[in-house]
Image (spheres, rainbow, N blue to C red):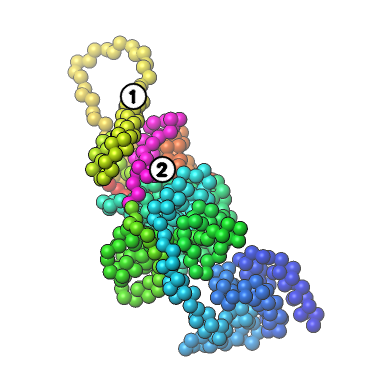
Amino acid sequence: MADLDRVKQQYQEAVAIHSKLTDRAQAYFDLCRPLMNPELIAAVADLELEYLTGRYPNISTRGNKTSGAGYFKLFKSGEISLVEGQNAKQVKQGDKTILKHLAIIPLELTPEQWAQRNKSTRVVDRIEDAAKVPLNPQDYLEAAIALLDSDSWVDVAAGLIALTGRRPHEIVARGSFSLVTGSQDWVVKFTGQGKKRGEKPVFNIPTLCLPRVVRAASKTIRQESEVQAILSESIAISDDVSAQNAAIDSRTNKRINRVIKREFGSILPQRKGDKVDEETEATGNCKALRAAYAALVTKRDKGDRSISEQLLYAGRALGHVAIENPIDKDLMHLLTTLGYSDFVINGDVPFVNDSESKKSKFKVSANEPIHEWVNQKTIEWDCTQAQVLDRLITFFESAQTTKLENSEDENMGAIADLQNQVSDLAGQVAALTQAFIAENAAQPQQPTAPAAPKPTATPKQPATNWALATAADLWGEDWNQLNRAAGAAEERIDRAIRAIFAFNDQLLGYPAKEKWAIGNRALRDLTGANGQLIAFRLQTWAGVIAEHHAKHGIASDYHNRAYHRGVDICGVIRPMIQAIDP
């Protein structure tokens, strides 16, 4: 009896104090781990089941919450030895019998509860209720794009969810958007899909705005110190990515949902089963935006196609079918897509272009050094400085013709206004080009002594285009003959940074401790360049590196020292440097 009272007291002191379910699951596991008495374990399990049942009366919700918090995974982790008759017993599961811990069996749903849960008609009810109020695409797109210009990262995140259909933790931390080479606009390559149980799919998704707008908004979110802190705290909670995602969602979902209700409450039709704000009567949440996104991109891109093709397209856009060449078995995931297929679209869905989104315009701050802006675009667009300027000029020269050809508005005042806008933008690009040329041409004049006459003149050698050099050209065949020519060290630094990017990106979704931070020491080891030159190059790459570190949960300047002490970075990254040879 004394032991029973003692264990119950320990439960109250160690487990009951936690309201956050992930912390509670860990405390429950820690309390039960040393117990080898069935009676004591049953007493603790009864207390926890009573709490969970009271907090989550709906059995479906309780099953999802306990699973998401890690209750079942902890007792399967291998950190606890199962001894039949002491802390475990044989339980029938499907066609086989397995040994389970006595503390977790009472928390699982019974066969009867599973049967009740599987009789749900929530999705069917939602689909049958779908056609009552249509969704206006123009209102939706205007609200979403306006959010991207907000100073609040929460607003920007809500806008990006609306335009890409991604989940909150994918927008805030996990997801990565990249341009698709040779593709049409309004498509990006997405990595960082959640809810894939260890899989790491990479696939194209349609967007409701231009890809560079998506990338710019994502970068804005990742550079926020609060977002970086949320990611760091989630990583500190667990090495398990699912648990980290749940922690991120718990810190962000409610805030984003408040923005959605505020900005989309009068736009989104109410989905059956969604909660309505009692004060404003507004509806909407992240899932509703995902459903709206799927309906809009499918109507825009597959509006006149068969029902089956539309459903498959929506499933791919949402990531339910996240492989390039699915087989028939993969189509079972389209049942999930059906649950997002309850919006009816009123009218055509437009392709949002540059003129309809402030963030997609080519612009440079008046206070930003011109060479830094151009260098940033060479990285973002993967091209040379000259190509950046040429692309800007081409864009603005063609903008007037394209817009006028596509316009059916015969109002000459509107056309004149459009011409003035394009003319102003073209003038900005012209000024940008001249400033860039002037800045790069300006060289400090140094007094020189008269040169002694030479018998013959040596012709000046053309500058080397180091971007075309191989790793052997830059480091030597055996990595021990560094090229000391002008510009070679800078290219080694840039090449090493890109290699670390590539190395970390192939581990997307893995714990941050397996990845490498990009800093002065790491680049000195990899390139042999001096610290001052590396510091200068790091300033040029600063924004891109910060975004990369945030994406992978690398939050400390001492990351490599903490997780890779004694490991030679050269042995890890050099193969990647060779892999990205031109």
Of marks 1 and 2, which one's residue comes earlier in the chain? 2
Residue 362 forms part of the magenta stretch: yes
Report the residue at 39% width, 31% height from top: 370
Q: Residues within 10 Å of mark 1 (few under 14, many from 20)?
A: few
Q: Which residue is mark 2?
A: 359
Q: Is residue 152 left or right of residue 471?
A: right
Q: How far apart in space, not on screen, are marks 1 and 2 (Cα)? A: 27 Å
Question: Looking at the image, is 425 positioned above or below residue 197?
Answer: above
Pick the residue in front: 490 or 97: 97
- Residue 264, label in figure: none
**For the view shown, which residue lies furthest in the front direction?**
411
Q: Quadrant of residue 65?
A: bottom right
Label 2 Cα crowd, 10 Å radius (few <14 / some 14-19 / many 20+): some
Determine the residue located farthest toward the top in the rendered image. 450
Residue on which disc 1 sits: 438
Q: Residue 437 sits in which quadrant?
A: top left
Residue shown at 52% from the left, 60% from the top: 283
Q: Quadrant of the N terminus?
A: bottom right
Taking the spot 43% from the left edge, 30% from the top edge, the residue there is 366
Q: Is residue 479 left or right of residue 233?
A: left
Looking at the picture, which amino acid does disc 1 mark? Ala
